Image: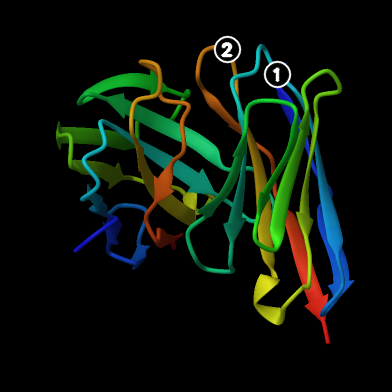
């Protein structure tokens, strides 16, 4: 079956760095997305990786290793507004998007 | 108005009621989706429409009935729901990606549904 694993919850301190991991087993691979979802709101797009390596976008970076079925989202200089759930999703060989359950990130002062 | 909009934002209905959720996208996309989001569970894809044709129905009970009259509008008709159907229902749209629907999706704010 198809599966995406990410930690259920993480806690970090304001101003620090946190890495949220995602591992996947899917039938084929056509890209990996990270979305941010604040409580009670819709998910919003953060990043897209289709080739191995690191994509940097401001305070957020996303890394992909296709051979390992692994990605991480790196958040730097954490702010209180970064408290949210972070969703990992993979496009499989049929161009269907498979979603992880999300990681709830709690930022403490 | 831009983006993806959904109405109503909140809905409380009894098990014998009939109601409809509405979604509208102003992004010129050709694919639209209905998702169910329950607490601490992955997003559950319910239906996919590509170029106004239903291309996916993930074993959703018949008490949920989608309708896509054109590429900008999507409805989810609800009847005789169960309490376990209470959840956040999200609509999304995307451009077609290499002929498929696995590209970046843009979400509406969702409808918080409570079935009593």
| Residue at the (83%, 18%) spot, across then down | A67
Residue at point 48% right, 56% down?
B88
Give the SS element for disc 2: loop
Q: Residue furthest left?
A: B69
Q: Is residue B72 above or below residue A52?
A: below
Say what secondary structure mark 1 lies in: loop
**Residue B116 lies in quadrant:** bottom left
Chain for disc number 2: A
B22 and A54: which is toward the camera: A54
In this picture the colour scheme is rainbow
Please give the residue where the numbered disc 2 appears in the rendered image.
Answer: A93
Q: Mark 2 or mark 1, which is nearer the start of the sequence?
A: 1
Query: What residue is at 28 percent from the left and 58 percent from the top?
Result: B5
- Verify CB contact (< 8 Å) between mark 1 and mark 2: yes
Query: The disc numbered 1 marks a residue on which chain?
Result: A
Give the residue pinned by disc 1: A26
Give residue A9's quadrant in the image: bottom right
Q: Residues within 10 Å of mark 2 (few under 14, many from 20)?
A: some
Residue B97: image location, x then y, percent: 40, 23
Identify the mark at residue B1; answer none if there is no mark.
Answer: none
């Amino acid at each position: 079956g198809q599966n995406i694993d990410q930690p259920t919850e993480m806690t970090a301190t304001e101003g620090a760095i946190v890495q949220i991991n995602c591992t996947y087993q899917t039938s084929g691979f056509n890209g990996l997305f990270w979305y941010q979802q604040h409580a009670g709101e819709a998910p919003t797009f953060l990043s897209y990786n289709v080739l191995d390596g690191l994509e940097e976008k401001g305070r957020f970076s996303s890394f992909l290793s296709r051979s390992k079925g692994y990605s991480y989202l790196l958040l730097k200089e954490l702010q209180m507004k970064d408290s949210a759930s972070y969703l990992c999703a993979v496009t499989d060989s049929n161009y269907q998007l498979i979603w992880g359950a999300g990681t709830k990130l709690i930022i403490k002062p | 108005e831009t983006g993806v909009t959904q109405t109503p934002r909140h809905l409380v209905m009894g098990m014998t009621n009939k109601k409809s959720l509405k979604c509208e996208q102003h992004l010129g996309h050709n694919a639209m989706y209905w998702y169910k989001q329950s607490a601490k569970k992955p997003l559950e894809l319910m239906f996919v429409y590509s170029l106004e044709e239903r291309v996916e129905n993930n074993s959703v009970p018949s008490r949920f009935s989608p309708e896509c009259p054109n590429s900008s509008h999507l409805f989810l008709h609800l009847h005789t729901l169960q309490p376990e159907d209470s959840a956040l229902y999200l609509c999304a749209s995307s451009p077609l990606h290499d002929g498929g629907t696995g590209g970046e999706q843009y979400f509406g704010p969702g409808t918080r549904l409570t079935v009593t």
